[in-house]
Amino acid sequence: MPIFAPKSAHPMDIPQIDLRDYEYTLPDERIAKFPLEKRDSSQVLHYQKGEIRHFHFYDIPDLLPSDTLLVYNDTKVIPARLIFQRETGAKIEIFLLAPTAPTTVIPEIMLAKHPVTWETMIGNAKKWKDGEVLQGKVSVADGEVVLSAKLMDRELKQVEFSWNDADVAFVDLVEASGEIPLPPYLNRKPEAEDRDRYQTVYSKKEGAVAAPTAGLHFTAEVFDQLRKKGIREAQVTLHVSAGTFQPIKVDNVLEHPMHSEQIQINRKTIIQLLENSGTMVAVGTTSVRTLESLYWFGVKLIEGKGEDFFISKLFAYEKRETTPSRTESLQAILDWIDSCQKESILGQTEIFIFPGYTFRMIEGLITNFHQPGSTLVLLIATILGEDWKKVYGEALEKDYRFLSYGDSSLLWL
């Protein structure tokens, strides 16, 4: 596939992509509103070289080559919906989006024991008066903490949170008082089981406001079988943002403003990726975005375009006579990490993967079935070409369950 060049001139330098080519009809009854009783009993559609077969997720170890390196996203969903009540009785909902002060680094902000400021979405904002401090009591450990919220910037929807116990971290307050932010298309309130089921069994690092849903099917039993087969694992972290649900509202999808998401990858993982000579399979589109962004960061280092790990929306499509190999890119990153004496790297990506993109890191993808006309369907079409319509048509015909709590697929390039 060609690498197109957008950045040196007007976006029209890239062939236009018509959103209508990536729409399909998804009946509401096909959207899985609740998870299955057992995670790994979901169906799996297996696609390879035009052939489609059907399995269950507990069959995944048999569907992967023994030389596979499975890369998954270990982010953990935080209960990002915080509900405060005014003295008048009116409820104000504050949805955490991204930290802004005293740091934008999510792991640091979650462990903070002093006031923090977040960019948010605010429900019922008109009833929250300027200067008014909202307060709520939160039961944490053996005590009760007063959590306060102050609207610092109404236009930017920036809210400062403070609390009256310096021994309590912000993450403790969020975990104790917040609601799990289920996707809007589920159109229901979170229930008790969502606390566990809208979370992968391997989630570790708090900071996502949406789950990396391809990983929801994994169980301890599946991992046990994978390891018995010799399949290796690598962990990356991408804190999924609410932008993942942002609909495309423009006919030419290249004009869609891609959301930025925070990435963290440790040195050990870079070495695992560099030394891998087998098949690399990403668990979920967030892992794909992380891996491909990592490759392009290595390219930035090689091309002398700075040491800032930020991959802009269309950076991958700039004109280049040649591009480094996967090994060259990863080696450049490892050399840079070692020269800086770092144990991990932190970055941001808004990479936009659509037909015309050439994958640099993966040979396969485990993923759920995505919303019509979404950036994620564009990513799937980049893997499958026109066969994405065949795959989604077959899944609909075979009564697969769609979206976050739905069934799975294993797709090969």
Image (cartoon, rainbow, N blue to C red):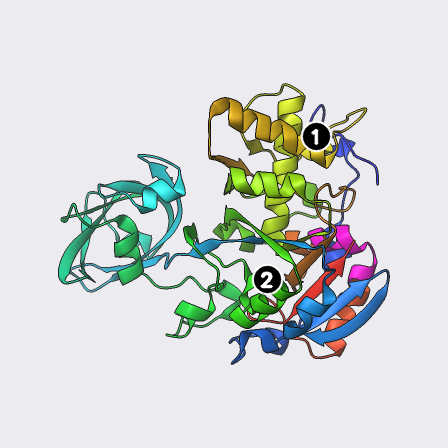
Q: Position of residue 249 (x, y in %)?
A: 62, 50
> Which residue does the numbered mark 2 point to in the structure image?
214
Of 366 and 240, nearer the camera is 366
Q: Amino acid at mark 1?
A: Glu
Q: Amino acid at mark 2?
A: Ala
The quadrant in which residue 79 appears is bottom left
- 193 vs 92, left or right, is right
Q: For numbered disc 2, what is the local secondary structure?
A: helix
Q: Position of residue 143 (x, y in %)?
A: 13, 60
The secondary structure that dominates the magenta segment is: helix
| Vertical side of 104 occupied by 231: above or below | below
The quadrant in which residue 221 appears is bottom right
Of 373 and 38, nearer the camera is 38
- 217 vs 12, left or right, is left
> Which residue does the numbered mark 1 point to in the structure image?
328
Of badges 2 and 1, nearer the viewer stands: 1
Q: Residues within 10 Å of mark 2 (few under 14, many from 20)?
A: many
Q: Are marks 2 and 1 in contact (CB under 8 Å)?
A: no
Q: Residues within 10 Å of mark 1 (few under 14, many from 20)?
A: some
Q: Quadrant of the N terminus?
A: top right
Q: Is residue 154 visible?
A: no
Q: Residue at x 73, y 70 (%)?
A: 45
Q: Earlier in the sequence, mark 2 or mark 1?
A: 2
Q: Which residues are magenta?
A: 379-388
